Amino acid sequence: MAGRRFGRFCASVLALAVVFWPTFAGTARGDDPPASGPVEQTPLGPITALDKELLVKVRLAGLWEMPMGEEATTRASSRRVQEVGAQLMSDHAFLDERVVRLAGRMGVPLPDSPNADQQSWMAEMRSRTGAAFDDSFANRLRAAHGAIFPVVSTVRANTRNEAIRQFAQVCNQVVLKHMTLLESTNAVTDAGLSKPVAAGAVDAPPVRTASQVSGSDGPSALIVLLLCLAGAVVTLVVLRLLRPKANVK
């Protein structure tokens, strides 16, 4: 009788591990598509929050990269940085005209000034001259382009709005072009390849919650515990089976 109860217990533990493993394994991968939010109807078709985010981010990029690109043509000590600045200014003027027109037709409000981080980068660059300006320009703009590149690519791949898709296609080509141009200055360091932060801020690693740790870096603590328990039970079963039986007289 005890042996049958023990066997049922083993079967229950293994069943739990089998049932919960796909769920936790899927959570660990973190490969679900990004949430795009509710769909909003516009004169040019439906758009999502992610579609609108693209418009806002492209507008913000132009608000600080156009003036800094123009200033680079006279403030930079490197001829290459001057050339890259002129190209970035021209390209963002083109994108800014398109994004303002597209957002206006869709009824999406756009900002009129750079955000706080962008203003801090502009202030940093304007406080520097010569090679120091070149380094700040190349790294700040490379980091900013690296941050918006995944947004552009995600919208291009997932949007259901044809106008947004075409705009994202153009933005994708421009952002990739700008990253290549900035890298061609030979001034981009690890700072330009990292997450952009406000000037003077310390780029500390984000603090993750327990659920984020268990859901992004591997199996959760619960599934590990279940598997360990299942392994222990199987070991005990094997030892029971291998234990010599007493002779019955």
Image (tube, rainbow, N blue to C red):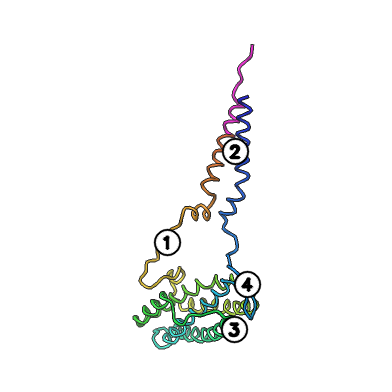
Is 239 covered by the magenta stretch? Answer: yes
Front label number (2 vs 1) = 2
**In the image shown, does 215 or 140 lie closer to the viewer?**
215
Graded by Cα atoms within 10 Å as few (under 14), some (14 to 19) or many (20 or more), the crowding at tag 2 reads some
Q: What amino acid type is highlighted by mark number 1?
A: Pro
Q: Are marks 2 and 3 in contact (CB under 8 Å)?
A: no
Q: Which residue is mark 4?
A: 159
Q: What amino acid type is highlighted by mark number 2?
A: Val
Q: Which quarter of the picture shows residue 127?
A: bottom left
Of pointers 2 and 4, the one earlier in the residue sequence:
2
Alpha carbons under labels 2 and 1: distance apart: 38 Å
Of pointers 4 and 1, the one earlier in the residue sequence:
4
Q: Which residue is mark 2?
A: 13
- The answer to whether residue 132 is visible is no
Left or right: 39 as drawn, with respect to 136? right
Q: Which residue is drawn at the image coordinates 37% and 73% (left, top)?
A: 199
Graded by Cα atoms within 10 Å as few (under 14), some (14 to 19) or many (20 or more), the crowding at tag 4 reads some
Span of residues in magenta: 234-249
Q: Which quarter of the picture shows residue 235?
A: top right
**In the image shown, does 87 or 154 lie closer to the viewer?**
154
Q: What amino acid type is highlighted by mark number 4?
A: Thr
Front label number (4 vs 3) = 3
**In the image shown, does 63 or 234 lie closer to the viewer?**
63
Q: What amino acid type is highlighted by mark number 3?
A: Arg
Residue 98 appears at what percent x and percent y?
57, 84
Q: Which residue is mark 1?
A: 205
Is 55 covered by the magenta stretch? Answer: no
Residue 238 appears at what percent x and percent y?
60, 30
Q: How many marks?
A: 4
